[in-house]
Image (cartoon, helix red, strand yellow):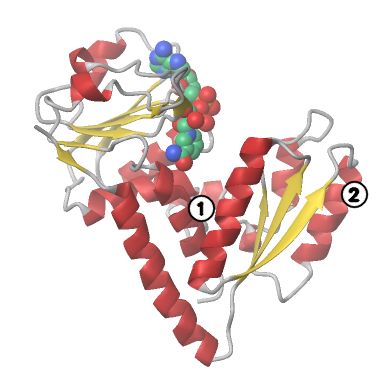
């Protein structure tokens, strides 16, 4: 039976630590401020944006909300970002993705000042992560590292296999595990013999976006399994990329879905906002 990594409890612990820090900094006259931009009214995006605003309110971070029409031009959005870049009262800028097709997501991300890019998506921050420099780190992978550390799981010298090479999860997760001195293998949709690779993993991070794709056959006895995937099933319940019922008896540690990696993303966003004013 695996030890279940409680992402809900760990994220709450982080938020409470940040709340205390925010109160201390407030006494010294410093308050963090996050500007959140949403384009259009996608219901899933609205839920994410609201959760971010709620987390800000809980911790004592100010949040500014910009709700733009789906039809807003790219230039109007870029111009708002440039204004916020130049506004000294704003410490963090977040543009909720995805954006409508007529707006170039890459251009938008690169327009955010790297010093305010609390999502950690700007090329300068990605570069810093890969060269050992200082910068914001993408929130979901940063959350994975906190889950491991706060569960007392050592990473140095361990073989970590990451499934997925996206810019927001797979690649930064691999870079962070390397920084934590793991030996890292990245697998993706063109990887041959995926099972052979994953069975070598002491720590398996799954971010492939395929519901319940990884069962016990892919997992070494006693492995630590981190499931980043999140999917809504036909019965309305959530599941991950890992077949939890199959893998849990074989793993030493496992993250559930929901309540594993998911809650960590917002906690790490809050951490990034606070680090912007430290
Ligand atoms: P993505 O679709 O951008 O990337 C998926 C990756 O998986 C790709 O690199 C692809 O090469 C790889 N892949 C796909 N099929 C594969 C296969 N059969 N074998 C091996 N590799 C395969 O997805 P993403 O944005 O990285 O997200 C991954 C999952 O994590 C999704 O389910 C997403 O909803 C979830 N997610 C959760 C959070 C969170 O806060 N919990 C945050 C971001 C993403």
Q: Is residue 12 left or right of residue 170?
A: left
Q: Position of residue 252 (x, y in %)?
A: 12, 35
Q: In this view, which residue lies farthest toward the top?
A: 192
Query: Could you tell me which residue is drawn at 23 percent across and 56 percent down?
Result: 150
Q: Is residue 110 visible?
A: yes
Query: Could you tell me which residue is drawn at 87 percent across and 54 percent down?
Result: 79
Query: Could you tell me which residue is drawn at 49 percent across and 70 percent down?
Result: 59
> What SS does tag 1 mark?
helix
The reply to whether discs 1 and 2 touch (Cβ–Cβ < 8 Å) is no
Mark closer to the chain start, 1 or 2 = 2
- Ligand 1 closer than 8 Å to the CB at disc 1? no
> What SS does tag 2 mark?
helix
Query: Could you tell me which residue is drawn at 38 percent across and 12 percent down?
Result: 191
Q: From the image, tell me which residue sits under label 1.
A: 128
Q: From the image, tell me which residue sits under label 2.
A: 76
Q: Position of residue 261 (x, y in %)?
A: 37, 42
Q: Is residue 118 visible?
A: no
Q: Position of residue 160 (x, y in %)?
A: 25, 33
Q: Is residue 31 left or right of residue 150?
A: right
Label 2: few (<14), some (14–19) or many (≥20) C-alpha neighbours in 10 Å: few
Between 129 and 216, the one nearer to me in the picture: 216
The circle on residue 94 is none
Q: Is residue 178 left or right of residue 272?
A: left
Label 1: few (<14), some (14–19) or many (≥20) C-alpha neighbours in 10 Å: some
Q: Position of residue 67 (x, y in %)?
A: 79, 51
- Ligand 1 closer than 8 Å to the CB at disc 2? no
- Picture quadrant where residue 217 is located: top left
Q: In this view, which residue lies farthest toward the front?
A: 235
Please say if 163 is above or below 175.
above
């Amino acid at each position: 039976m695996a030890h279940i990594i409680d992402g809900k409890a760990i994220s709450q612990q982080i938020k409470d630590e940040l709340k205390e820090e925010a109160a201390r900094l407030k006494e010294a006259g410093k308050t963090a401020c996050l500007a959140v931009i949403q384009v259009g009214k996608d219901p899933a995006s609205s839920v994410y944006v609201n959760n971010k605003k709620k987390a800000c309110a809980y911790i004592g971070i100010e949040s500014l909300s910009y709700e733009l029409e789906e039809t807003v031009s790219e230039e109007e959005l870029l111009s708002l970002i440039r204004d916020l870049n130049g506004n000294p009262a704003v410490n963090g800028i977040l543009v909720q993705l995805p954006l409508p097709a007529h707006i170039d997501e890459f251009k938008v991300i690169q327009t955010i000042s790297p010093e305010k890019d609390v999502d950690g998506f700007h090329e300068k921050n990605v570069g810093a992560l890969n060269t050992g420099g200082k910068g914001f780190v993408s929130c979901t992978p940063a959350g994975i590292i906190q889950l491991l550390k706060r569960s007392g799981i050592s990473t140095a010298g361990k073989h970590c296999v990451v499934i997925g090479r996206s810019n927001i999860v797979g690649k930064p997760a691999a870079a962070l595990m390397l920084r934590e001195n793991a030996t890292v293998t990245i697998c993706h949709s063109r990887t041959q013999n995926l099972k052979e690779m994953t069975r070598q993993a002491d720590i398996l991070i799954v971010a492939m976006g395929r519901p319940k794709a990884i069962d016990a056959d892919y997992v070494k006895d006693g492995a630590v399994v981190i499931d980043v995937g999140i999917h809504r099933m036909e019965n309305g319940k959530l599941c991950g990329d890992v077949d939890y019922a199959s893998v849990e008896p074989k793993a030493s540690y496992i993250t559930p879905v929901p309540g594993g990696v998911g809650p960590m993303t917002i906690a790490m966003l809050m951490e990034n906002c606070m680090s912007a004013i430290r």
